[in-house]
Amino acid sequence: MLIGNYTTEFVHLACGSESGTPDLVIRLDRDISEVIPYLNTVLGGFQYTKEPRSVSFRLNGKLAVIHPRKICITAPGDRLEAEKIIEWLRDKINDTWERRDEIEPRFESVASPKVLEILRLLPKTNCGLCGEQTCMVFASQAAKGVKAPDDCPPLNGEQKTKLTKYLGQFEFRS
């Protein structure tokens, strides 16, 4: 078992969500650097950093970043949702570590959402109802996994469906 003990805290990260909901930081009792390239393969990480090692991926609409000694998750909601995410991640990391001989580690990022493709699917009203000044800023936040189609109030049914489908191909579901 790679992950045993850990502590959690809710904080407001500078790069986290702007929803006012605190982000979750899971501090690990040991360095898990060695499993990160394997998690990049298993979880379909969209951003992989070699030094220091980290992998970012989208998990059920949240942005998650696994570092050697901590895991950061944007605005997981309430404690119950946070506990479910922590348990799922712990199990996924430990399982990946146990099966590492069966997994080809990946040391680079995979394809990620394109800002201009997201912008093409938005209403382009620059109304600010999403909390961003422009649709371009919203699109860049959506590409990073910080904003979701539901965060754009003027997005109609067909547009929302297309944007959800487009972003969904880059997201991992637990």
Image (cartoon, rainbow, N blue to C red):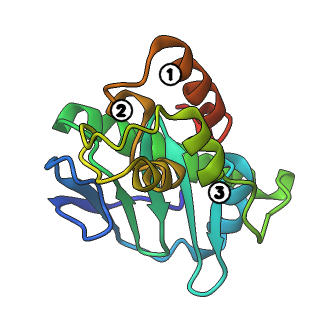
Residue 168 in the image: x percent, y percent?
61, 32
Looking at marks 1 and 3 on the same chain, the residue that comes earlier in the sequence is marked by 3
Query: In terms of secondary structure, where does tag 3 sit?
Result: loop
Q: Is residue 92 left or right of residue 138?
A: right
Amino acid tagged 3: Phe
Q: Residue at x 77, y 71 (%)?
A: 107
Residue extending farthest to the top is: 157
Q: Which residue in the protein does label 2 denote? A: 152
Q: Which residue in the protein does label 3 denote? A: 46
The reply to whether dot 1 and dot 3 touch (C-beta < 8 Å) is no
Residue 119 in the image: x percent, y percent?
55, 44
Residue 93 in the image: x percent, y percent?
56, 52
Amino acid tagged 2: Cys
Q: Residue at x 72, y 64 (%)?
A: 109
Residue extending farthest to the front is: 125
Looking at marks 2 and 1 on the same chain, the residue that comes earlier in the sequence is marked by 2
